[in-house]
Amino acid sequence: MDQTTTAPAPFSSYLALGDSFTEGMCDDLGPDGHYRGWADRLAAALASEVDGADFRYANLAVRGKLIGQIVDEQLEQAVASGAQLVTLAGGLNDVLRPGCDIAVVQARLGEAVERLLATGATVVLFTSTDPTRRMAGGARLLPAIRQLKAFVEELGAHPRVAVVDLFSAACFDDRRLWAEDRLHLSPEGHRRVAEAVCQALGRPAAFDWRAPLPPAAPPGGWAKLRGDLRWLRIHVLPWLGRRLTGRSSGDGRPPKRPELLPFRAQDLDGEVRL
């Protein structure tokens, strides 16, 4: 019996929606001065499939956005764009805030997915990583994260919805996949998420994105204390200050790629790679 499988058809356009996760916070900087991020890396991989033919990419994600803001400020353009592929990650900023109404988060996310599917697009969604083994206070967030995860998995029953399961990937327990702020991915974390999306879309595996990093010696007691104090001073206190004053890190910030424009794999950093 012939065991060959048909390769998935390439996409000619890709649009990314979301918050800092999709904007690419804390990845290396690209040639345009913006963080690259997993979405840029994914766009480069998809562009390389069409042999220099017209491939278009937009990234509307802006750091700090809540799911309601993502839907209200980004969705209309995504629907009108006619992009063949749309990635949507949102809701975690809501979960981080006390008093989050997870039912409202689910309703807005479901609304967005329904409208995107009506355009004929393929939609990629994400489950959050499990914060309990790497973040102080992560257990407080877990019930809401699990509820949102179950809802995303329900949406994933649609044949044009692909779900990237980050929750079960134990490699993300390793702090080396996270930036100094412990909230955004490191370059290696972004590289792995880009590969995870490629595989969720049926592309052959370039590497095992779930594989653990090589063992590393844990920091000494004093080094850990200094790191924790630096984290509190540089990252936690400013974040709390913004929450208390009703501000966001994304206030007034435009998206880095606001239009669905031609994009080549080489536009990422001069070479084709994830």
Image (spheres, rainbow, N blue to C red):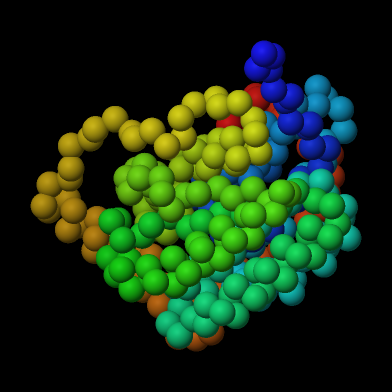
For the N terminus, the image quarter is top right
Q: Is residue 3 left or right of residue 143?
A: right
Q: Is residue 249 left or right of residue 98?
A: right
Pick whichever, 228 or 106, lies toward us. 106
Looking at the image, residue 252 sits to the left or right of residue 141; the answer is right
Which residue, as the protein is rendered here, is positioned at the far front?
Answer: 1
As drawn, which residue projects farthest toward the left? 221
In the rendered image, which quarter is residue 17 located in? bottom right
- The answer to whether residue 259 is seen in the rendering is yes
Splitting the image into 4 quarters, where does residue 142 fall?
A: bottom left
Observer able to see residue 31: no
Q: Position of residue 264 (x, y in %)?
A: 77, 32
Front in this rendered view, residue 272 or 32: 272
**Residue at horizontal 56%, vertical 79%?**
103
The residue that appears at 68% across and 69% down in the rendered structure is 110
State the quadrant of the C terminus. top right
Residue 224, percent across and down? 18, 53
Q: In this rendering, would 271 be left or right of 234?
A: right
Q: Position of residue 120 (x, y in %)?
A: 84, 52
How many numbered discs?
0
Q: Position of residue 150 (x, y in %)?
A: 51, 63
The residue sitting at 55% across, 27% down in the picture is 205
Q: Does 72 appear above or below 190?
A: below
